[in-house]
């Protein structure tokens, strides 16, 4: 009898383990198929716009993983705007190709800044936000790793929230004679999905998108007053805001369920075995 119970327990445990492995495999496949999963910075990114704005209001929209380029003059302020959703930790990369050494009169210092949809400057966790280019340098590269975007925050806090983020690139120190020299700028935004580890119990009613209070309304009817209107919010993720269903909380939930099932089966059989005599007479 005890051998039969052990075989039955083994089959039950094996079935639970197989079910758990199937759930984990399907979850992993869903992550691989998720179009919102971030690509590696080594992929180079897709080709993006070839111009940049000169103010917040004229910032050029760009998606994450796109490489945006622009020709400008030394001393110009260059602006791009990109979307970032909850759970993402964006990294802004910027590269400036400097003029020929013979035309420059000294070193220059460049800086990249990031602002949210409310134009609040966001601090960089780490990276090379400001860098000095030597007089004989050909390029200067900068980076800024933002904090993880939260789904909700107190009104008085300066936490990154879902919405659009501005990138501003400019020179902050150089010889006056070098103002106006032509430069070539390049920027790219990558992000790491931090998932449920940074989730909070709350969401925004609307993402922080520039121009949300004065958006253009496009009539979908015949132009009459009764026609429905569609609000354009400008820069947003290609698959919509908070559209990804996957977080690493699924792993903890599934794993906890499998472990709880195994513990219940083991405890039941252990308790049942202790409640019966070790030697049962034949026929019982």
Image (spheres, rainbow, N blue to C red):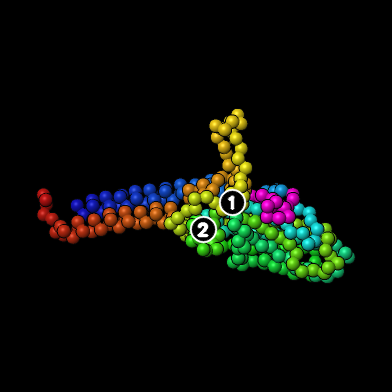
Looking at the rendered structure, which numbered label has been put on residue 221?
A: none
Residue segment shown in magenta: 50-68
Q: Position of residue 40 (x, y in %)?
A: 61, 55
Does 57 lie within the magenta span? yes
Q: Which residue is mark 1?
A: 209
Residue positioned 15% across, 57% down in the render: 276
Seen in the picture, residue 228 relative to 123 is either above or below; the reply is above
Q: Spot the residue most to the top.
A: 222
Does 254 lie within the magenta span? no
Q: Which residue is mark 2?
A: 150
In front of the other: 7 or 182: 182
Q: Position of residue 53 (x, y in %)?
A: 72, 53
Q: How many marks?
A: 2
Label 2 CA crowd tier, 10 Å (few <14, some 14–19, many 20+): many
Whether residue 38 can be seen here: no
Question: Mark 2: which secondary structure?
Answer: loop
């Amino acid at each position: 009898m005890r051998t039969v119970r052990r075989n039955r327990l083994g089959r039950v445990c094996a079935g639970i383990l197989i079910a758990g492995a199937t759930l984990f495999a399907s979850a992993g496949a869903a992550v691989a198929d998720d179009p919102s999963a971030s690509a590696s910075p080594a992929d180079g990114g897709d080709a993006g716009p070839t111009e940049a704005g000169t103010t917040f209001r004229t910032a050029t929209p760009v998606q994450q993983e796109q490489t945006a380029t622009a020709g400008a003059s030394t001393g110009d302020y260059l602006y791009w705007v990109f979307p970032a959703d909850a759970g993402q930790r964006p990294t802004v990369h910027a590269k400036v190709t400097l003029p020929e050494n013979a035309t420059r009169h000294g070193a220059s210092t460049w800086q990249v800044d990031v602002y949210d949809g409310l134009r609040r400057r966001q601090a960089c966790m780490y990276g090379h936000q400001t860098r000095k280019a030597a007089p004989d340098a050909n390029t200067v590269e900068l980076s800024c790793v933002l904090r993880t975007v939260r789904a909700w925050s107190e009104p008085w806090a300066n936490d990154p929230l879902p919405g659009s983020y501005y990138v501003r690139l400019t020179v902050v120190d150089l010889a006056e004679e070098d103002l106006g020299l032509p430069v070539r700028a390049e920027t790219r935004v990558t992000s790491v999905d931090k998932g449920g580890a940074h989730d909070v119990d709350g969401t925004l009613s609307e993402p922080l998108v520039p121009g949300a209070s004065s958006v253009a309304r496009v009539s979908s009817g015949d132009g009459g007053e009764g026609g429905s209107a569609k609000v354009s919010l400008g820069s947003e993720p290609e698959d919509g805001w908070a559209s990804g269903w996957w977080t690493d909380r699924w792993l903890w939930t599934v794993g906890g369920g499998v472990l709880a099932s195994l513990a219940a089966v083991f405890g039941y059989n252990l308790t049942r075995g202790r409640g019966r005599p070790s030697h049962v007479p034949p026929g019982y």
